[in-house]
Image (cartoon, coloured by chain):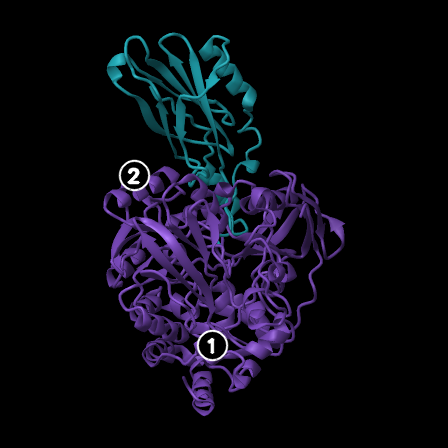
Amino acid sequence: MVQRIEMSSVSRRDILKFAGAGACTALATSLLPGLAMADAKLAAESIKKITGGKTPTMGKVTLELPQIAENGNTVPVGVDVDSPMTDADYVKTIHILADGNPLPEVAVFKFSPASGKAKAATRMRLAKTQNVIAVAEMGDGSVFMAKTEVKVTIGGCGG
Amino acid sequence: MLDRRQFLQVAAATAVISGAPGMLSRAAARQTITQDDLLSFDSVGQVTLLNFTDCHAQLVPLYFREPSVNVGVGDVKGLPPHLTGKDFLTAYGLKASSPEAYALSSEDFSALSQTYGRVGGMDRMATLIKAIRAERPNNTLLLDGGDTWQGSYTSLKSSGEDMVDAMNALGVDAMSAHWEFTYGADRVKELIEKLNFPFLAGNVQDTEWEEEVFESTKFFERGGVKVAVIGQAFPYTPVANPRYKIPTWSFGVREKLVQQRVDDAKAGGAELIVMLSHDGFDVDRKLASRVSDIDVILTGHTHDALPEVVKVGNTLLVASGSHGKFLARLDLDVQGGKVKDFKFKLIPVFSDVITPDPEMAAVIKKIRDPHEAKLGTVLGKTESLLYRRGNFNGTFDDLICQALLEERDAEIALSPGFRWGSSLPPGENITVEQVFNQTAITYPNAYRSKMTGQLLKDILEDVADNLFNPDPYYQQGGDMVRVGGMGYHIDVNKPIGSRISNMTHLKNGKPIDANKEYVVSGWASVNEGTEGPPVYDVVTDYIKKKKVISIPPNDSIKISGL
């Protein structure tokens, strides 16, 4: 159910080692030419595929994400859709996408009225600062969405 | 309380304790300020909150210049604490050259330091706290916002234990934290065992199961009022400081969780809810507008000193400065679970006019005695005012960058924009203690490596966004990274990637080439395994060689968008 994305055989950690030392910083994705080629277009195409061309309505979906990733390799993400989860009104699937990753599709969660709640959590790798998007398809075919920016920083000089 | 003669005797004794050469500041000698003036306060209500934060392990009096540049962006542009110098004095109706002006602004600092002298010292702080506790025996709560265990030679050598002893002696009722975590997870847990009071950090969870690592809330009864204190550690500790030292702890602002803690405290019968926070002022200003029912936020991290509380909705925000320079007193009248009335005073701890508390002086003496010779070792003298605090290069940073360039044979130097570090007026000796006051960290190695011009730009852009992102929740660090050997322009209002321009290699006046590699030296890398000599040794060697330090005005950084 949960797709995992591997950026390539060169891990972010290897790159950090290669870079040696930043200011009071670590170094991240500006060193990844050719790896982080993806842009928001790919994610938009994926969303189109999911919704069959419909434009999702903002709302009903809540994303739980850190504002700033502590570790881009494993960013916790939670998603929650406001729904009574009855036969008449329920959430069918939730898609999580990361619009700056080489492969934007992160995870798909499937639900039925028997699920009781439309809520899920996982961890993902984020290659750089980008938007994380959750798209929820409802039983009646309507589509809802939420979007949050997560900063993947090269580090700072803590106060 | 003391007559003039007694006072002078005490002050002379004090000078010995603080290791200061015997001269008393002129204001103290003339008694233009007195201990009684500092303590004078018409109490209100049932609860007295006493608060200091970010003392950075400073046990003895020092100089500390407030910033001359503290830029606010977005909604907070021009709002306190983003006011400096004359603007600050005007906003708060303070007279130039007054004791308050000296304590709260950077105006005329070198000259006024001769008049008003040093500030802080935990023995002076203890005197104030004891006096207020004597006046309000069952009403007083003493809260420390954290950044207490790090920032000095003795704290580094004792891995924070000296400050645990000092804070236990001071009778702190609860603390929160940030730099404490740089001693590593095991040491933090060890030191918490030695504390006589709770270490509150409700926003720290383990990475595996998202369970709480520390206590979040502590209830106290003061003046018949049930007070809940909710602790919040610096939300971006694993980003701004080495994550490898606390690999299984996760932080964050966690707004929803804060609301949950507040609701739980209310349900538990709390009539007054106090958040002891290391979020930083702008983060807390935003948080106060989004989390309901917090009565008081004792802010920290950003080292702001404000002589009045800032009100956000019904929440009172206190900013009590840093380095033991101030003690904040907030009296609250609580009726039916609401604050009906309050009174506030930010008390400057003028070292020369406060009688040191003998018990605390003894604790400090015990801590420092074994190191006294080393601490007092004179390395050189400064002809310039040395300071760090401010959004961009301070003179102490310029000194560190010069040391890195020369001692590590580099073309460009990078030095972290920490907010801590004492100041030193012109004419003063630079001692080993002064060097450690700028550099005492657990990851001090001064690296030397090659970086492309593009990488240097990316670093500046990234750090600038940590400071000037218009959304405070995305501000995760200290001030701007300090640079040596390179100049640049910055437009604080642009988005990430386009704030920095005109990067120039100062040695030859040429633009920095994105594709060229430069030899860079810096320190405080958050990466594990960084190699190089500790920066305090590098700086020590440099000052010893130079003997006399003079820092020319730094005009290599041009700022726009203000």
Image quarter for residue B357?
bottom left
> Dot 1, how many residues are within 10 Å of its Cα: few (below 14), some (14-19), or many (20+)?
many
Please name the residue that numbered disc 1 is placed on.
B351
Q: What residue type is labelled 2?
A: Glu
First of labels 2, 1 by sequence position: 2
Q: Nearer the viewer, residue B111 or A26?
A: B111
Please give the chain letter of the residue carrying mark 1: B
Q: In which quarter of the image is the N terminus of chain B?
A: bottom left
Q: Which of B183 and B495 is in front in this view?
A: B495
- The number of numbered discs placed on residues in the rendered structure image is 2
The residue at 66%/68% (across/down) is B551
> Dot 2, how many residues are within 10 Å of its Cα: few (below 14), some (14-19), or many (20+)?
few
The residue at 37%/46% (across/down) is B294
Whether residue A37 is situated above or below residue B122 in the rendered picture: above
Q: Distance between the residues labelled 2 and 1?
A: 45 Å
Q: Nearer the viewer, residue A148 or A105?
A: A148
Please name the residue that numbered disc 2 is placed on.
B210
Residue B213 located left or right of residue A146: left
Chain A display color: cyan
The residue at 61%/62% (across/down) is B89
Does dot 2 land on a helix, a strand or a loop? loop
Residue B411 located left or right of residue B218: right
Chain B display color: purple
Residue B301: image x %, image y %? 46, 55
Q: Which circle, 2 or 1, is nearer the viewer? A: 1
Q: Which amino acid does label 1 sit on?
A: Ser
